[in-house]
Amino acid sequence: MDHLTASHYTSSTVLLGKLDALLGNRSLSVLRELAAEPDSAIIEPLTTGVDNDLLKLRINEGKISEEIANQVYPGVWATDVPGKAKNATPVEVKLKEGRQPVRIKQYPLRKEDREGIRPVIEKFLQLGLLRECESDFNTPILPVRKPDGSYRVVQDLRAINKITEDLYPVVANPYTLLTVLTPELTWFTVLDLKDAFFCLPLHKSSQKIFAFEWENPKRGRKTQLTWTVLPQGFKNSPTIFGNQLAKDLESWEAPPEEGKLLQYVDDILIATKTEDACMTWTVSLLNFLGLQGYRVSKKKAQVMQRKVIYLGYEISAGQRTLGQTRKETICQTPRPQTVKELRTFLGMTGWCRLWIYNYGLLVKPLYALTTTEQKHLKWNKETIQAFKLLKKALILAPALGLPDVSKPFFLFSHEKQGIALGILAQDLGPYRRAVAYFSKQLDATAKGWPGCLRAVAAVVLNIQEARKFTLGQKMTVLVSHTVSVVLEAKGGHWLSPQRFLKYQAIMVEQDDVEIIVTNIVNPASFLSGNTGEPVHHDCLETIETTYSSRSDLRDSPMENTENWFTDGSSYVLSGKRHAGYAITTSQEIIESGPLPMSTSAQKAEIIALTRALELAQGKAVNIYTDSKYAFGVVHAHGAIWKERGLLNSQGKNIKHAEEIMKLLEAVQLPEKVAIMHIKAHQKVNSELERGNELADREAKQAAKVFEFTCGVFFLMKIEKVAKNNDHNDLKAEKYA
């Protein structure tokens, strides 16, 4: 990150003065702190000038031209009387099986609060939105005072939400909803439906579920009231309403002029190429909504604008930025004192993560704070700095380009501290403009992999996120590791078969992805349009040197070297477990013997390979095993397990720790050694298959030989030595 220079400081201070006069919002004080601290880290320099469109947004909000007003059905505009969707059927709410009615007593309310919500309750009763009832359900209400001094009623339906059946949320993804907007669409209208949920009736059989207690402060009479319409605060209300509105919009005939209509629950966006088309679409849709029984908030309407605020984003031709209101809300948030407050703050910032390249790194210390069991958070220098930097990053968040699916995409992928970082961009003149920034943690298993394999996992995560925007358009992935080669050569050692196939399908088998290995690791270089030079880093050599149990261990056979085969066997016969091991050539048995009856198949394979390495001390040998587990220990996992203190990536003790330590020590004994994996139970068509079959057969036979004396197990190692072979003679070793 660059530091603020003197010239940056001067220009930023002048710009802040202009912005302060224009907007006068709290977020500017954060920018002032930034400009006043030359040593602070900057996410991206302030280089753009003041855009008066931002001020126009606030001035024009709710302003309807006379030309539009004269063409629109007057009943579409919201009044004190909510709308009623004409095609909606009463909503039935189903309880989860076996759940009993919820009865939560009303919290005591201050008289002034009850007086404040009394007009609201009486109005809802008069309009038929509420009715008196006698119900075995009851949940409390909470009066909430608005900034203008009036009140609104909020019902605590958390207990009801727990006992009612879930509906799959089929609402659009707000992150990808805007991908259908093309740069040619430059005129916009945003409509907000007023009291949207109240437009849908609630089935009479379901009304009792939402009952609450009410005491009229004027008369002192207590009664139960319940909703006759879809209530706010019910978990399924957004999905139910969104589906109903989407169904009704299917019957709307859009004007012939080119344009797009987007719907997210009760928020609607119209985007067209020309101002005239925007007027035609707006008038047509308003008339349709009004005749269908919906009501639109005139106060919140943004009609025929070049720039609008939609879902908290500022939308203009070909780009979107974070809305000022959202930035202000986050910047005004004081430092959280409890885990709940911190999670709320992180939830707000998480909505903005697409605008911050290193979001995952910035919030990592803050997420670590949420794991504390203490009631009050203990902030340190690192977490305080992360909190400040996150706010600064949000204030300086750049405008993102709207994805244009007619043009190819570029994806920059990087992994740092177990977090997949990515930038999706498209060419804009000689440069690239960011479409989205990705930041996602690798899972616990992937975090334990070598760095080059973590880069593979990061590429997969970033491609999955990018495809939400590219919609099948070609994507060139730039990464500083030879990820395709690493996946093919080393993936089988570290990845489960299911994960390996998934990674192959995403990276290799799709024709919309091209992976280019580059030396670029700086996002600024990527966005400048540079593709970089070929990388000189050898991923395979790095993995083999760093994570193999010995630096010269090979996974391909050496020439003119004897081939040995190992196998471990464990099976149950007549209710008793038998275990054994064997070491052979393709024709002769070198050593075999029984193992304790509690020995598992994995443990037997480890013991067999260990014993072969001990017998090969000072020699050069090729050793074949059909155990993927034993092969993975010596080639991939063993060294890192040893470094961690025999703990896995989740911090738990690994199985067979003692045997694995013996194996890692034994692999150092041969002068030269290559350990290969061979498939088990294949037809015998070659010398290798013959040797593996002999080791398998002899291990099963050896498992039948066992003897117990005074609770001590004597393992007889039966050695059958071939002619001209200088292995040890028959011997016995004692294992307690």
Image (cartoon, helix red, strand yellow):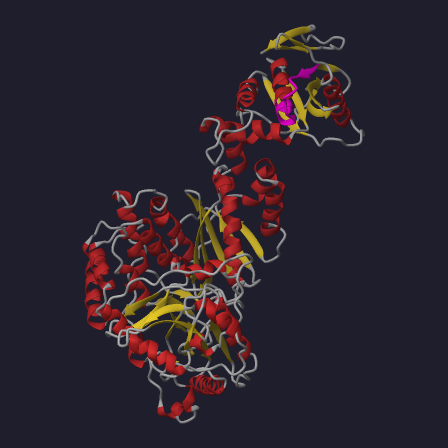
Give how far across and how far down residue 1 sits, in percent: 32, 50
Residue that appears at 48% across and 37% down: 448
Give how far across and how far down residue 456 sits, in percent: 52, 45
Mark count: 0
Residue that appears at 33% across and 49% down: 339
Residues rendered magenta in the picture: 592-606
- Image check: 209 left or right of 123? right
Q: Is residue 302 visible?
A: no
- Image check: 604 left or right of 338? right
Give how far across and how far down residue 246 sits, in percent: 53, 75
Compared to residue 493, the image places residue 527 above or below, namely below
Q: Quadrant of residue 153?
A: bottom left
Residue that appears at 27% across and 58% down: 333
Q: Quadrant of the C terminus?
A: top right
Q: Quadrant of residue 608?
A: top right
Compared to residue 492, the image places residue 607 above or below, namely above
Q: Quadrant of residue 581?
A: top right
Asked whether 595 falls inside the magenta stretch, the response is: yes
Compared to residue 110, the image places residue 699 above or below, namely above
- Image check: 48 left or right of 139? left
Query: In terms of depth relative to the viewer, which is nearer, 310 or 155?
Result: 155
Asked whether 319 falls inside the magenta stretch, the response is: no
Query: In terms of depth relative to the viewer, which is nearer, 288 or 713?
Result: 713
Compared to residue 430, the image places residue 523 above or below, namely above
Q: Is residue 142 visible?
A: yes
